[in-house]
Image (spheres, rainbow, N blue to C red):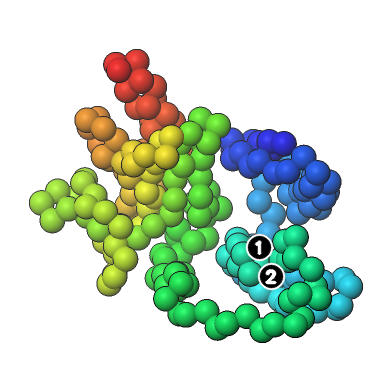
Amino acid sequence: MRIRAPDKTTVSVSSDCDRALLALSVFAPFGLATVERHSNLSLMDVATGRAIEFPARHVKDIASLFCAFALIRETKTEELAGSKPPPLPDAIFDPPARDPSLVPDWIASNPDFKPTLVEDDGRIVLSFAPLRMNAKSKYLVDGRCDEGFPDYWGYEVTADGRPFGWVVLMAPGTVLVTGAGNNKYSKHRNVTSAMFRLSSHLGVMELSE
């Protein structure tokens, strides 16, 4: 089952997930974000009463960890009770995410700058990232800045799973699209128009192939 929001964000869920639409009707009845990043959410096992609280901005990370390590999949409880799993080496875990306090407030407080954005029914995906700019050109991106302080924050773009340039949040009202094939960089007033430009670049590239 595919659910699409007014901003074209598309999510696929299992057809038997009967609570998906209920969750949306409670927390996003119009398909738009209603929960603040710093709001507290809770996760509770109704049968045992076990529960935790966490900031809303961590909900995706909590969900990923819960699905990977907490859910029992086709394994009998009796078998698990009789043996203690070996400790997991630290090396299997990804390093912690960058400190969100490093993100400028004009970006963090803008609801348009979501961690992940999609265009063209999910063909184009924008993933929020710290960026390192080219030393010789302020309009070219060398790549992600995984160490030290980034030059800018923005989005790493993929199209059909392949690298497709960058979106740079240069200043309030100035959004740069660069590195999309052989296309010249372009400046936009908001991320929505930048996404439209990426979509048009992809369409032109397909016609030329």
For the residues labelled 1 and 2, the Cα–Cα distance comes to 6 Å
Horizontally, is 5 left or right of 171 in the view? Answer: right
The residue lying at 44 percent from left, 50 percent from top is 127
Label 2: which residue?
Answer: 70
Q: Mark 1 Cα within 10 Å, few/some/many (few <14, many 20+)?
A: few
Amino acid type of the residue tagged 1 in the rendering: Cys
As rendered, which of 63 and 53 lies closer to the eye?
63
Label 1: which residue?
Answer: 67
Circles 1 and 2: CB atoms closer than 8 Å: yes
Residue 144 visible from this viewpoint = yes
The residue lying at 29 percent from left, 62 percent from top is 145
Q: Residue furthest left?
A: 136
Q: Quadrant of the N terminus?
A: top right
Look at the numbered disc 1 and give the secondary structure of its residue.
helix
Q: Residue furthest top?
A: 207
Look at the numbered disc 2 and give the secondary structure of its residue.
helix
Query: Which quadrant holds residue 49?
Result: bottom right
